[in-house]
Amino acid sequence: MNPETTAEDLERTYAAFIEKSARPADHLEAPSMTAAVVAEDTPPDPLRIVEALLFIGGQPLKAERVCEIIRGLSVEQFVEAVDTLNHSYRRQGRPYTILAQDQGYLLTLKPAYRGVIEKVYGGPREARLSTAAIDVLALVAYRQPATKAEVDSLRGAESGSLLRQLVRRGLVQVLQQEGQAKSEVAYATTPRFLHLFGLGTLEDLPRTQDPQQM
């Protein structure tokens, strides 16, 4: 599969096959024509088209989009095609499978083979947090839900860029507090924060002798 191939390319190719096969024949085929040449005039199997669309990758493939590309294919037939492909992959011992995700389907490596990606591209590396970012993260963790104004006041410094950095890294999330103006948001830690710091719950945070220090 050419990595530059898109769903639109496949749609055009399939449509061309359908259009060509619908035209009346102007003459009989020569007896000497080989099977390979005849095969070139045969529209691709819808199952193979579905598989090709999954191999393209990107966003989860939705049934509605596939039914637009493959003329006459129903949602039920698409789901059946996915089941057929998965059964075939299991029987052949393939390292990939098709998973349901975000109301669509995604072709992905099985967990046992995902380490291959890290060997090829390198694993995800966590950038070290600066001392200032750790200070802000600690304040949010102990004071949550904490507003930016509260964090700024406790630090005695502007914290907006550090809060945004922590949000981008998935350590802090933005909460909209009830009864507050839309512009007034609060910050709290995320499950990713607990995981990275080896905490089961927020109750496992180290306790300080003086709560006012946090």
Image: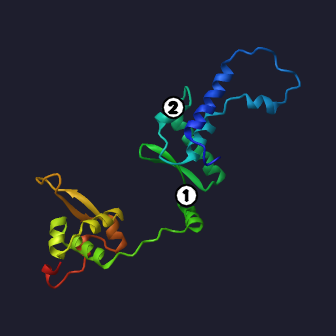
- What residue would you read off at disc 2? 67
Residue drawn at (34%, 74%) of the image = 197
Q: Which mark is residue 110?
A: 1
Residue lying at the far bottom of the rendered structure: 209
Residue farthest front in this picture? 158
1 vs 2, front mark = 2
Which of the two residues, 6 or 171, is positioned nearer the viewer here?
A: 6
Residue 50 occupies quadrant:
top right
Q: Amino acid at mark 2?
A: Cys
Residue 185 vertical position relative to residue 153 in the rendered view, above or below: above
Position in image of residue 114 (x %, y %): 55, 62
Asked whether residue 98 is in view, the answer is yes
Residue type indicated by callout 1: Lys
User: Is 76 left or right of 178, judged from the image as shown?
Assistant: right
Residue pushed farthest left?
Answer: 179
Residue 135 position within the rendered picture, expressed as x and y whole percent measured from the top left: 25, 77
Where in the figure is residue 111, as x and y percent of width and height? 53, 61
Q: Element type at marker 1?
A: loop
Q: Quadrant of the C terminus?
A: bottom left
Q: Secondary structure at mark 2?
A: helix
Q: Badge 2: how crowded within 10 Å, few (<14), some, or many (20+)? A: some
Q: Badge 1 local density, few (<14 within 10 Å), some, or many (20+)?
A: some
Asked if residue 147 shows in the view, the reply is no
Q: What x and y, as percent, mark residue 40?
A: 74, 31
Residue shown at 15% from the left, 66% from the top: 149
